[in-house]
Image (cartoon, helix red, strand yellow):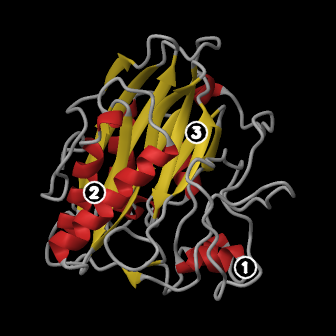
Amino acid sequence: MSAAGPTGAGALEQGPDKEGAAPLGESTGVRLAVGAGTDRGLRRELNEDSYLAADPLFAVADGMGGHEAGEVASGECIRTLGQQQVLTQGSREATASDLQAALRQADARIRELTDAQAGTTVTGVVLVEERDVPYWLVFNVGDSRTYRLSQGALEQISVDHSEVQELVDGGYITRGQALVHPRRHVVTRALGAGSDTEADYWLVPVKEGDRILVCSDGLTGELSDSQIHGIMSTLPKPQDAVDALIQAALRAGGRDNITAIVLDASNVGGPAGDETMDKPPQRDHADGDTLPRPPRPEPQGRQADTPGADAAREPGTAADTDAAPETTAVQETAGTPLHEENHG
């Protein structure tokens, strides 16, 4: 297994063969150090994950459908995103509307190529600027995840589009019970299949020392958040963190394809240093933390609420924290399950 590059055919787009750092923006001087990798796992015949790690876009897609169809879906998703002019190297002008248009294009292409018989999750971040201030533009469809380690605290920014997440939101099961629930692989949104394909978006200010993790559920299905936090907070080099995360997931069972991207932000404008690695966890509400959607009293039968894609929000400090009264959802999802992941 080579965690720095793809090991399966599903990884059509890849990041650097070794970690690197490059300036991302003349006005902000933000620099990123990046590590990326994927592994077929111990039980799958194919690797149906695909990823892209190239300024300014860092994304992971997890294909579903089996018999190579999932590979086609995830690969086409990543390929379509990578072809967008607004996401070309060095650009920091992308908006949620731009991403929405690209994801809808990917959805249409997947349906055309697979006759709507396959789908894919996708999540990730785009480095953008608003008034010369750097932000992470986070997006998500499905149950792949984007995390941020900032000032010692690990937070899941994305919110899973899955049956078990709705049960957690409704208070029917705990987050711990969700890890072993028999319906944990049933997603309620995906590109290429089903009727609900819209992404959620968040706009998160970049802080000095931020460390971002973008990963497929082959990682989070094997490792708890505390295990992820332990690895992310102790290994300074992004590629070392990627390698360790993948190896830990393999040791835990490796039941699915495993893909991870880790990127570190520095020279953001604040004091230089190892804030992410050394500072104890802190709860910072100065950025107007919100959740992408409030908890729901019922897990099924809810009406979809889809305001404009430009209404990107900042994340809460934890995925299971109660939303503040003023919190509004970026996009709601209906409670009907889409399909269960099938990797062949």
Q: Percent position (x, y) of residue 94?
A: 44, 36
Question: Foreground residue, 41 or 90?
Answer: 90
Figure quadrant of residue 326 = bottom right
**Distance Cα–Cα, label 2 vs label 3:** 26 Å
**Distance Cα–Cα, label 1 vs label 3:** 27 Å
- Compared across the picture, whether 325 is left or right of 125 comes to right
Numbered disc in front, either 1 or 3: 1
Figure quadrant of residue 190 = bottom left
**Distance Cα–Cα, label 1 vs label 2:** 31 Å
Say what secondary structure mark 2 lies in. helix
Numbered disc in front, either 1 or 2: 2
- Compared across the picture, whether 326 is left or right of 77 comes to right
Q: Percent position (x, y) of residue 31?
A: 44, 18
Can you identify the residue that label 2 sits on? 77
Can you identify the residue that label 1 sits on? 170
* Residue at 48% from the left image edge and 12% from the top image edge: 29
Q: Is residue 283 visible to the viewer in this orientation of the structure?
A: yes
Can you identify the residue that label 3 sits on? 149
